[in-house]
C-alpha cells in the first residue's frame, strides 16, 4: 500500500468511529432527556390531577353541605 492509500483508510476508519460514537452518545443524551421530560410531565400531571380532585371534592362537599342546610 502506498502512503496515500494508508491515509485514506485511516481517515475513513476515524470518520466511521467518530460517527458511531456520536450516534451512540446522541442517543444516550436524547434518551436521558426523554426520561427527564417524561418525569416532568408525570409530575405536572400529578399536581394538576391532585389540584382538580381537591377542588372538585371540595365543591361537591360544599354542595352537599348546602343542600343539607337547606333541608333543615
Image (cartoon, rainbow, N blue to C red):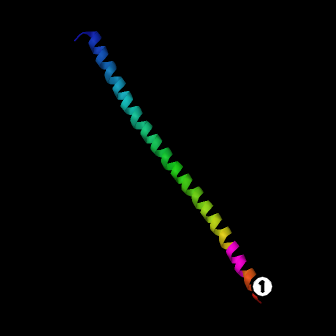
From the viewer's perspective, is 1 left or right of 49?
left
Residue 68 sits above or below residue 13 on the image: below
User: Is 48 or 8 nearer to us in this picture?
Assistant: 48
The image shows residue 51 at horizontal and vertical percentages of 65, 64
Q: Dividing the image into 4 quarters, which one contains the C terminus?
A: bottom right
Q: Which residues are magenta?
A: 59-64
| Position in image of residue 28 (x %, y %) | 43, 41
Element assignment for label 1? helix
Question: Is residue 63 part of the magenta span, yes or no?
Answer: yes
| Residue 23, percent from left and from top | 40, 34
Q: Main secondary structure of the magenta part?
A: helix
Magenta-colored stretch includes residue 40: no
Tell me if 61 is positioned left or right of 37 in this view.
Answer: right
- Circle 1 packing at 10 Å, graded few (<14), some (14-19), many (20+), is few
Which one is in front, 29 or 55? Answer: 55
Position above or below: 44 against 64: above
Above or below for 68 versus 58 = below
In this rendered view, identify the residue nearer to me: 1 or 32: 32
The residue nearer to you, when weighing 27 against 21, is 27
Q: Residue at x 66, y 70 (%)?
A: 56
Please provide percent x and percent y for residue 69: 77, 85
Residue at left offset 75%, top offset 88%: 71
Residue wearing tag 1: 70
Amino acid at each position: 500500500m502506498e502512503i496515500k492509500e494508508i491515509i485514506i483508510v485511516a481517515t475513513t476508519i476515524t470518520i466511521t468511529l467518530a460517527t458511531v460514537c456520536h450516534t451512540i452518545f446522541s442517543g444516550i443524551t436524547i434518551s436521558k432527556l426523554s426520561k427527564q421530560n417524561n418525569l416532568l410531565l408525570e409530575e405536572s400531571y400529578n399536581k394538576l390531577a391532585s389540584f382538580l380532585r381537591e377542588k372538585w371534592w371540595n365543591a361537591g362537599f360544599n354542595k352537599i353541605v348546602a343542600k343539607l342546610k337547606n333541608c333543615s
